[in-house]
Amino acid sequence: MERDVIIACDFANKEDLFNFLKPFKGLNPYLKIGMELFYSAGPEMIKELKELGFKIFLDLKLCDIPNTVEKAMRNIAKLGVDITNVHASGGIKMMEAAKRGLEGTNTKLIAVTILTSLDDEALKNELDIVKPVKEVVLDYATNAKKAGLDGIVCSPLEANIAKKLNLISVTPGIRLAGDAKGDQKRVTTPNDAYNLGSTYIVVGRSITASLNPVEQYLRCVKEFKNE
Ligand code: C5P
């Protein structure tokens, strides 16, 4: 099974990203580009990064009616990214439409189950969902499987759900031992994530906010690949 460390590139603009990447020359780490950077630097930057040889997880979390998502995915398909995603809460038909939009590419499609910023209380009081998060994650992951998706975004603590369904798990909420948690509630070390069976770990601030990002990245790789 392919396992890798993905760096969450939560930068405001392209200049900041390229400055950050300079010391990584030759390493070509897997990058996660989210809404903040995409809305600032656009599809051209993604094409440029692909030409430079980076693997890209384009984390745009699409959620709209199936027709709109399918057409948006047709445009994402042209970028040649390695992974992209939708919200599972958009429903099975929407996920199927997203997959159709990516037809003819090697782009893996994964679904966000429940955002880690939501807990049981918020589901009940704000979204009128009475089931606990864990059960909803299982239901949404099952829907993603039915729609033919490749995997889910979830906590490493839920990676076993993905495994049971034969889906890949892309898991954020990672901290190296001793690093600040920030706004993440439940954090896991790369080594724990390895033991819990995550396919990919997504690491942001433990690498990007460090004084020596390359060293931190290599620590994550070593721990996660159990080398
Ligand atoms: O800095 P940190 O390691 O917390 O960054 C985690 C990254 O993963 C961020 O880009 C965040 O948006 C993303 N993410 C997350 N939890 C989710 C989905 C995505 O932390 N459920």
Image: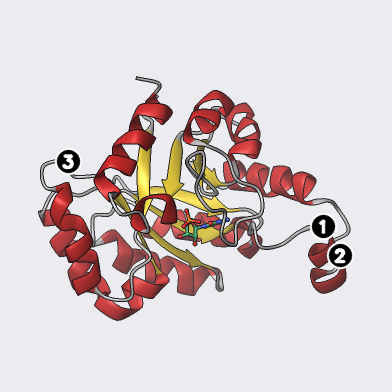
Mark 3 vs mark 2: in front: 3
Q: Amino acid at mark 2?
A: Lys
Residue 1, percent across and down?
40, 24
Residue 44, percent across and down?
18, 71
Residue 137 in the figure: left or right of residue 49: right
Q: Nearer the viewer, residue 164 or 123?
A: 123
Residue 143, percent across and down?
65, 47
Q: Secondary structure at mark 2?
A: helix
- Residue of label 2: 124
Q: Is residue 163 above or below residue 90?
A: above
Name the residue rendered at 18%, 64% in the picture. Answer: 18
- Residue of label 3: 27
How far separated are the C-alphas under marks 1 and 3?
A: 40 Å
Q: Amino acid at mark 3?
A: Leu
Q: Nearer the viewer, residue 67 or 123?
A: 123
Q: Nearer the viewer, residue 93 or 50?
A: 50
Name the residue rendered at 44%, 47% in the picture. Answer: 202
N-terminal label among 1 and 3 = 3
Residue at the farthest bottom position = 40
Q: Is residue 184 above or below residue 160?
A: below
Residue 123 in the figure: left or right of residue 14: right
- Residue of label 1: 120
Q: Tell me whether the residue at label 2 lies in contact with that at label 1, contact meaning CB atoms closer than 8 angstroms.
A: yes
How far separated are the C-alphas under marks 3 and 2?
A: 45 Å
Q: Amino acid at mark 1?
A: Asp
